[in-house]
Amino acid sequence: MSIPKINWRHIPLILVSIYSLFPMYLLLINSFKTKSEIITNPMGLPSVWTFENYSNAWIQGNYSVAYINTIIITGTTVILVAILSGLAAYGLSHLQTPGSNWLMGYLFISMSLPVGFIPLFFMAVKFGLINTYMGVIIPYVGGGFAFNVFLLRAYMIGIPKELVESAKVDGCNSLQAFFKIIVPLSKPAFIIVMIFSTLGTWNEFFLANALLQIEEVRTVSAQYLSFGSKYSTNWALMAAGGVISVIPMILLFLFMTRKFVAGLQEGGVKF
Amino acid sequence: MQTINTNLKTSSSVIIDSNVHKKHNRKRNWMGWFFILPGLLVHILAVTIPAVMSFYLPFTEWNGLNTPKFIGIANFIEAFQDSVVFTALFNNIKWTLFWITIPLIFAFLVAYLLRKVNKGQTLYQATYFSTSIITVTVAGQIWFWIYNPFSGINFYLDKAGLGFLEVPGLTIPAIALFSVLFADMWKGFGTNVIWLLAAMTQTDKSLEEAAKIEGANRYQILRHVFLPQLRPTLTVITLLTILGSFGAFEMVYVMTAGGPAHSTETLSTYYYSLSTTGRRAGYASAVALFQTFIAIFIIIAFAYIRKKKGWDV
């Protein structure tokens, strides 16, 4: 077997990369064209780079409101997920809580339970949570709770009990030990839980579309659909709106690429 | 003998120690629940109560606002006479058959190639996964535009003399579902690549070397050495793929909303529109429960196969 200088496998892999990236390239490139130019030149670079689509989409798509909504919902969800799942994972890993095995079994079963979308939807109606941030935040936090607890617990188990014990000897109570010892040492697991919660919440559509029915509270993902129903023929505007919708997650992904891939690998191996 | 003695000593002292520990900590042990409860309450509210309710609601007539009225199995009788339910079920089955073949084989081949690439392995993985981070409404819109006969892409194909590639995909009921599936595959195959590659990097290289020395050819190595080691991962991915396929919703909803003429309806899109716009929460719950039963059946089937074959997953 002769070893070639360049691995031939790059050729098919690059082709697959093009398959992945080309639709996104279309979205990006067409957001800088005029409406008429897209018809005659759908795939090439724009003859004149226009930025009007962005300002129009921002205003007509009501994106300033959608952005604020999404940031509030995502931010609250991620913070609550980190705190609530973190505390619960600590309770299940380091505090020898009675009944924790039983609880783990329950959480495991709950992961395979159906998503009770219809009861959830009408509970929201009953409690007046339709068109409120809380209406989606509660199911987001609750829905990811079991999985996140398992992930964080698996990581916390690896932290030596002696560290927590010695902290307690030094006069920390359980809660202080959690914040002083467990959180700093479980940082990698927390980061993975938080970035995947961020991605999931920002992009969530199923519940957001059903529970957030007016523009004042809609998230970017759900907002884009109603934006599309109004301007579906104006692809230049739609493309700009699309770029606006995905850019924060793209940036997060670019900054955290390794964490994303590592997190997925962990998840895959854990199964 | 001595070792046994010391062992006994240490172990008994450990037992005594832990007993002292337990007694000492019993009061504080219950404290753990203070840490667990806040999150657990949210979980019960958002997951457990809805799940329990979804087993009762299908037996009621309910528009979502009044009090649910118990009507026995009337909803199920209606569901079995509802042609849309069967269309949706067959679409879910088609969805499943597609996802466990083409995208899975494709992801497997990509991961297999990627295994032997050291330079840029993470970059490739990131590239393939990057489609997954696009919000589904935007991804749907991109493909909607690609398929749209008036968008310019088809016009462009005409000019390039590639007219045969024109796909007015979403308007023809017969191929609308496949068009949506193709977009969904683009969005979702990257995760499988990462999972399969993670499993492949954990396989035992020395077994392959040994097989090579024994004179096995490349195909035999793949078939008898490589694949059996991946079986647990492949099983799990297949299970998750099938379960996901029976819950297929987002891409369908944003691209076709179940149309044209219910041809791309899945069980999820059907009960979603029944409950949110149709005000038929009881009936929608029956359709949703039907979907749940399918999922339970699949999980049991997998557990049974695992037991029978003795696979350790």
Image (cartoon, coloured by chain):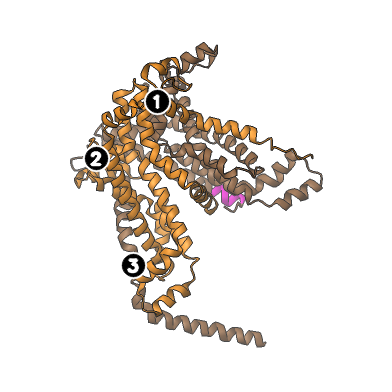
Q: Which residues are magenta?
A: B304-309
Residue under label 1: A32
Q: Secondary structure at mark 2?
A: loop
Q: Secondary structure at mark 3?
A: helix
Same chain, labels 2 and 1: yes
Main SS class of the magenta portion in the image: helix
Residue under label 2: A217
| Mark 2: amino acid | Val
Task: Read off the chain for label 2.
Answer: A
Residue under label 3: B33
Query: Does the rendering let one see residue B70?
Result: yes
Rendered image: mark on residue B252: none
Tag nearer the camera, 3 or 2: 2
| Colour representing chain B | brown
Tag nearer the camera, 3 or 1: 1
| Colour representing chain A | orange
